[in-house]
Amino acid sequence: MSKLMSAVKLGPYQISHRVVLAPLTRMRAEEGAMPGPLMAEYYAQRTSAGGFLIGEATIAAANGNGYLGAPGLYEDSQIAGWKLVTDAVHAKGGRIFLQLYHAGRQSNVDVQPQGSTPVGPSEILHGGVAYTTAGWVPNTPNRALTMEEIADLVESFRSAAQRGIAAGFDGVEIHAANGYLFDQFLQDGSNKRTDVYGGSIENRSRFLLEVTNALISVWGSDKVAVRIGPSGSWGDMSDSNPEALFTYVAQQLAKLNLAYLHLIEPRIAGNIEDEAKDQNPVASQLIRKHYKGTIIAAGGFTGDSAEAIINAGDADLVAFGRHFIANPDLPERLRRKLPLNPYDRPSFFGGNEAGYTDYPFYSAEAVAA
C-alpha cells in the first residue's frame, strides 16, 4: 500500500492522505486584497475528502505586501472573502490552514500604503522584484524597522490570526522562508542589527519565536505551524552558517508542540526549480535529526520522490505546487498513477480563470480522444 496515500494525524486533525496543496501565490485576489468567488472555486477544486490544503501567502500587516493581487487578513473587512474559501473547502470535507506572511524588504513603494518605504530588519541594498500595476519591477530599497515597529508587527500577526479563526480556517502557518521578513531576520546576510534582534543566532530567531508564541496564544500550539527554507537563497538571502541557524530554529520549534514544521528544499530558488542543484532532500534529512514532530516537505517532488521521502521517515507529508496547480485532482491521479496535465508557467501569477480554474480533471474519454 502507498504510504503517500495513507492517513496521518496533523495536529488535532485526521488527514486521509499525505498529498498537500502547497501555499501558492497566485495573485487573483480582488480589490482591497479580498478573496472572491474565483479563489473559492480554485481551492474547492483542489479539495479532496479528508485532504489538507495550505492557503497562499496572506498579508498580515498593511505594509506587508510585495505583490499586487495577493490576499490579506490585516483588516476585518477581508474576513468575509476568506470565509468563501474555507466554506468551499469544508463543504468538500477538507481542512485548510491560513498562511500569514510579510514581504519585508521584498516590496516596492507602489504596493505600500501611501507609497511608504518597504521595511526590513536592516537597510541593505538587494535585488529581487515586486509585482505592481506596472508589472514586475525592482524592489524599492528598504529602511530598517524600529524596536517599536517590531513589537507592533508581533501584534499584527496576532490580530491576523484571530481573524483567521473568524474566517473559518483550521489552523495557521507562519511563512518564514523565501526571503520574506522572517527569513530576513533569521539569515545574517540580511540582518545586521546590533540590538536584541540581531547578531547571535538566538537574537536573529527572536522575532520568529515571538510571533509563533503570539499565534499559539490565539490558536493553541497544535493548530500553529511554521514554514522555513534552510539554505534558501532567493531574494539575495544568505547566511554564514545556515546549518547551525536552522538546526537551532528547529530545536526551538520542537519544544512548542506545533501542528507541523514545513520545509522547503534548497533546490527550489523562490518559485523556480534549480535543476543544477543536488536533487536529494537535504533540508528534511538535516532537520529531522532535530525535529521529531510532523514534517511537511516541499520543493519539486514527484509522486515517486514523495513516496520515497515518507518511506525514509524524513517527512510525514509532501506539499505539491506546480503539479497541484495543473491537476486539481492530483491526489487521485497519484493514487491511481494517472498521467498529469502539464502546467502553464506564464499564467502562474495574476490574471483570471485561465491557468487557474480551467485545468481539467482526469477523464479517460479525454485521454483516449
Image: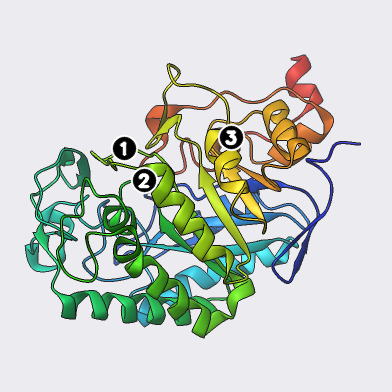
Q: In front: 35, or 171? A: 171
> Pointer 3: residues within 10 angstroms few (<14), some, or many (20+)?
some
Question: Residue drawn 41% across and 48% down?
Answer: 244
Q: In front: 358, or 154? A: 154
Circle nearer the N terminus (1, 3): 1
SS category of the residue bearing label 3: loop
Q: Amino acid at mark 2?
A: Asn
Where is 305 relative to 157, above or below? above
Q: In front: 212, or 271? A: 212
SS category of the residue bearing label 1: loop
Assess whether mark 3 and mark 1 are in contact (beta carbons under 8 angstroms).
no
Question: Residue drawn 14% across and 51% down?
Answer: 108
Distance from disc 2 to disc 1, alpha carbons, whole Å, reads 6 Å
Task: Please tell me in which quadrant of the rendered image residue 243 appears.
Answer: top left
On residue 359, the disc is 3
Image x and y of residue 16, in percent: 81, 54
Image x and y of residue 296, in percent: 62, 49
> Pointer 2: residues within 10 angstroms few (<14), some, or many (20+)?
many
Q: Amino acid at mark 1?
A: Trp
Numbered circles on residues, count: 3
- Relative to 98, 260 lies left or right: right
Question: Residue drawn 51% across and 56% down?
Answer: 250
- Relative to 17, 232 lies left or right: left
**Residue topped by disc 2:** 178
**Residue topped by disc 1:** 234
Circle nearer the N terminus (3, 2): 2
Assess whether mark 2 and mark 3 are in contact (beta carbons under 8 angstroms).
no
Distance from disc 1 to disc 3, alpha carbons, whole Å, reads 29 Å
Image x and y of residue 320, in percent: 59, 39
